[in-house]
Image (cartoon, rainbow, N blue to C red):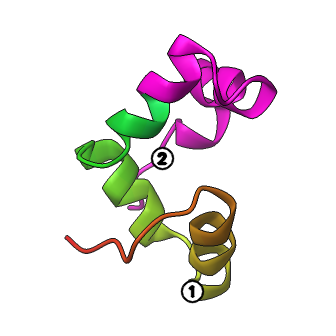
Amino acid sequence: MSKEYKCASCPMRAKYEKSPRSFVGRFWRWHINFCPGWSGYFHSLTPEEQTALGQKYNLTKQTK
């Protein structure tokens, strides 16, 4: 049974996509640095998808 993550459709992530410099956008970006849900979502992706997200959001290597 695989866990379903809502990170792909997160309303805060959508606000970041629309306006990364907004308060909510900056909060979301800060939040993903330690969010266990984001970590699980990130690690559920293929290595190619992880690389793409890493480049898109300027992430350092994510580990569990």
Q: Nearer the viewer, residue 14 or 30?
A: 30
Cα gap from disc 2 to disc 1, whole angstroms: 18 Å
Residue 47, label in figure: 1
Give percent across and percent down for residue 5.
48, 44
Dividing the picture into quarters, in which one does residue 63 lie?
Answer: bottom left
Looking at the rendering, the stretch of residues picked out in magenta corresponds to 1-27
Q: Nearer the viewer, residue 3 or 23?
A: 23
Q: Is residue 12 above or below residue 37?
A: above
Q: Is residue 32 above or below residue 11?
A: below
The number of numbered badges drawn on the structure is 2
- Identify which residue is drawn at 69% across, 73% down: 52
Give percent across and percent down for residue 39.
33, 57
Q: Mark 2 vs mark 1: give the one in front.
A: 1
Give amino acid for label 2: Glu
Residue 4, label in figure: 2
Query: Quick check: is 23 in the magenta stretch?
Result: yes
> Which residue is at the far top?
23
For disc 2, the neighbor class at 10 Å (few under 14, some 14 to 19, many from 20) is few
Query: Quick check: is 29 in the magenta stretch?
Result: no
Quadrant (top left/top right/bottom left/bottom right) for the C terminus: bottom left
Quadrant (top left/top right/bottom left/bottom right) for the N terminus: bottom left
Q: Is residue 43 above or below residue 21?
A: below
Mark 2, secondary structure of its residue: loop
- Identify which residue is drawn at 34% across, 34% down: 31
Give amino acid for label 1: Pro
Q: Is residue 36 left or right of residue 13?
A: left
- Identify which residue is drawn at 44% across, 56% down: 41
Q: Which badge, 2 or 1, is on the more N-terminal residue?
A: 2
